Image (spheres, helix red, strand yellow):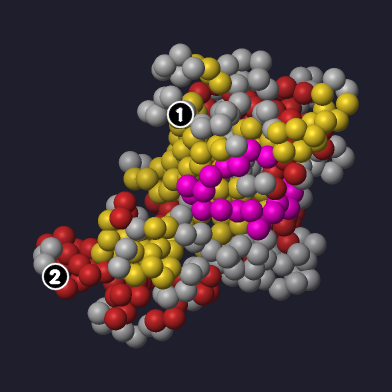
Amino acid sequence: MIAYGVFSSTDDHSPRVAARIGLNIIDLARLCELGVLDKINLAYFTSNSLNDFIRQGYSFRQIVKQAVEQVVDTVTNDPHSELMAAVFALNQVKLYMPVKIGGYTDFYASKQHATNIGKIFRPDNPLMPNWVHMPIAYNGRASSVVVSGHPVKRPHGQILVDGSPQFDCCKKLDFEVELGVVIGKDSVLGEPINIDNAAEHIFGVCVVNDWSARDIQAWEYQPLGPFNSKSFLTSISAFIVPLEELSAYKVEAQPQDPQPLPYLQDKNAHSYDIRLEVRLATAKCHEGIVIGRSNFQDIYWTMSQWIAHHTVTGCNLKVGDLLASGTISGNERGNLGSLMELTINGKESIELPNGEQRTFLENGDSIIIDAYCGHEIIGEVSGTVVK
């Protein structure tokens, strides 16, 4: 499976576009210089983002993919080939934000997650009435989306303590296991995207961790939803997998009841069998522990429905925009995608192999989220909490 990102090497510190296959990084600009991609404009590969690369579309990507696969085959059979000059090991390069994100929208598309959270606060009525009628979302902060590995600075804000707001550091810092969609085609302001054409506007997917300050969120979110509790940081994986690469993992979408309104009726409703695994490691327990496994195939609202609903008013999408799924959770305790669910808002704790316990994240803790299709890893995102 091929993915694309932006990297620099030790011999050339300028960021440029790369393809990733397994643990190999292929320098696409160098393939141009070596004559492998000699009929393609070098500028598409010397940029510090994928945006121009994405704009070239599907046929362009197929040309690039074919060339990359031929190069990998060649250097595998002949390690002394001159094409080795374009091949780097993943652990020997620096990775950057893969795209310039103009807009970021975070959905709430997992029915299991919405129900789990609702049960904590509204046990008799966990799902709000509008949830099953449309994909709920909020507009996040694109400027604070960062690439995997960026430190997570513990945020400060207003927190309600004994009935009075106080300014303090977040005590309930949480993660959220999510999958992101990167937009691959501009739409026109004032013109909704028909759900039948929505997939044409998707470039690919990435892994997302939408860090959350739960105590700040509890005080601010009514009536307009999250603001400071979410805007401080969102992490994404360094490589984006084009949607066509996932075709073998397409699965039937979850049934929807009641039937959504016509503009949300997806004739080809499907999801993808993408397994997500989250690990928690601490300063004292470096090996960490797997604390959650979930699967994107359980998502209730489909990617196409996200796009159709997002644009139904005429709101336009741009290449590089990020749409995230919201926390992906299942029905069992081992299939939850946030500490809010795992610890029931701090009422129960998680125990690590060395005896440490956690309800929410402490300074020095790391969260690593890996995404798999079959036995192949398609992306990973990590971050470590700092003061």
Magenta stretch bounds: 136-155
Q: Which residue is mark 2?
A: 81
Name the image quarter holding residue 112.
top right
CA gap between label 2 and label 1 equals 43 Å
Look at 50% across and 68% down and name the residue there.
49
Q: What secondary structure is marked by label 1?
A: loop
* Labelled disc at residue 55: none
Q: Can residue 348 be seen at all in this image of the molecule?
A: yes
Q: Is residue 322 left or right of residue 34?
A: right
Instruction: Identify the disc placed on residue 283.
Output: 1
> How far across and how far down the image is residue 335, in percent?
52, 27
Relative vertical location of residue 386 with respect to residue 261 in this rendering, above or below? above
Q: Look at the numbered discs 2 and 1 and tell me whether their residues touch, using CB distance below 8 Å.
A: no
Residue 150 in the magenta stretch? The answer is: yes
At label 2, the amino acid type is Ser
Question: Is residue 145 magenta-colored?
Answer: yes
